Structure formats: C-alpha cells, structure tokens
Amino acid sequence: MSGAEATEFSVETIGSAHGAPVLAVHGQADLHTAPELRAAITNAIDGGAKGMVVDLSEATFIDSMTLGVLLGAVKRLRPTGGKVGIVCVDPHIRRIFEITLLDRVFSIHTDRAGALAVADGSA
C-alpha cells in the first residue's frame, strides 16, 4: 500500500474492565470499514457488554458512517443504562464530534482511564 492509499483499517478488542470492552480502532474508519467496526461492536454487545470504550487514538480519519455505527452502539446500550466512552486525541477527529454536536452524546476523553470510568459506570 503506498502512502497515497488509505491507511489500513483494523479494529481490535483489547480487553474488558467491569464488563466494558475496549475496541481499538486503527487507520481510516469510513464507509468501507464500517461493517467491520459494526461487527466488533455487535459481538461485544451480544457477548454481554454493559458499556464499551471505542479508542480512536490510532484512527487517522472517521466519516459519517463511522458516526452512525457509534450511534448504533449507543442506541443498543441505552435501554440497559450502558454507555459508550470515546478516546480521541486527534483534534481533527474530535472536531467532527463537536461540529455534529455528538460530543453531547458521547463522553469523549484523551485517555482510556477516563473513557472506561464512564463506560463501566464508575464515573
């Protein structure tokens, strides 16, 4: 893959704290990779996750499809009181949440500890 091509995407379930798995997203999360992210989120929720952290610290780009997938996670977790904590260190990606007012829907943090505290209900 050349530098001009999209950064390779991956999503990895890193672990779980108090029933809240951490999904680490790497590369460009977009229309083409949304199904993989959706599958990882669905697997976590179907596996009993009460909340979750989506770590975007290694993401290089997100689009509206990615936001839709994340909103789907909120919708599925909300009836049981579950929350989605987001880790975001890139100011450009954070700005996407702010422009769309989704920073009011998601709890956005610069580290996993803060996001986990929200996702596992200890905050």
Image: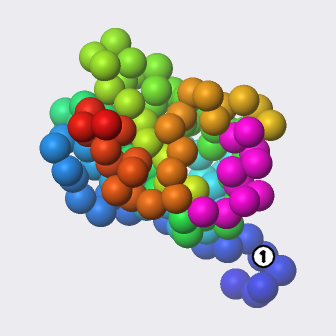
Q: Amino acid at mark 1?
A: Glu
Q: Is residue 58 left or right of residue 17?
A: right
The magenta region covers 89-98
Task: Count neighbours of disc 1 (C-alpha within 10 A) and say few if under 14, some if 14 to 19, many if 20 or more.
Answer: few
Q: Residue at x 34, y 56 (%)?
A: 113
- In reply to whether residue 96 is colored magenta, the answer given is yes
Q: How many circles with numbers are drawn on the protein?
A: 1
Q: Is residue 118 left or right of residue 107?
A: left
Residue 16 sits above or below residue 58 on the image: above
Q: Residue 21: x and y, percent?
A: 28, 49
Q: Residue at x 24, y 37 (%)?
A: 122
Q: Residue at x 45, y 50 (%)?
A: 54
Q: Which residue is mark 1?
A: 5
Residue 24 seen by the camera: yes
Residue in the foreground of this view, choosing between 99 and 34:
99
Among the 4 quarters of the image, the one containing residue 117: top left
Q: Residue 101: x and y, percent?
A: 72, 29
Residue 92 sits above or below residue 48 on the image: below
Residue in the foreground of this view, choosing between 20 and 122:
122
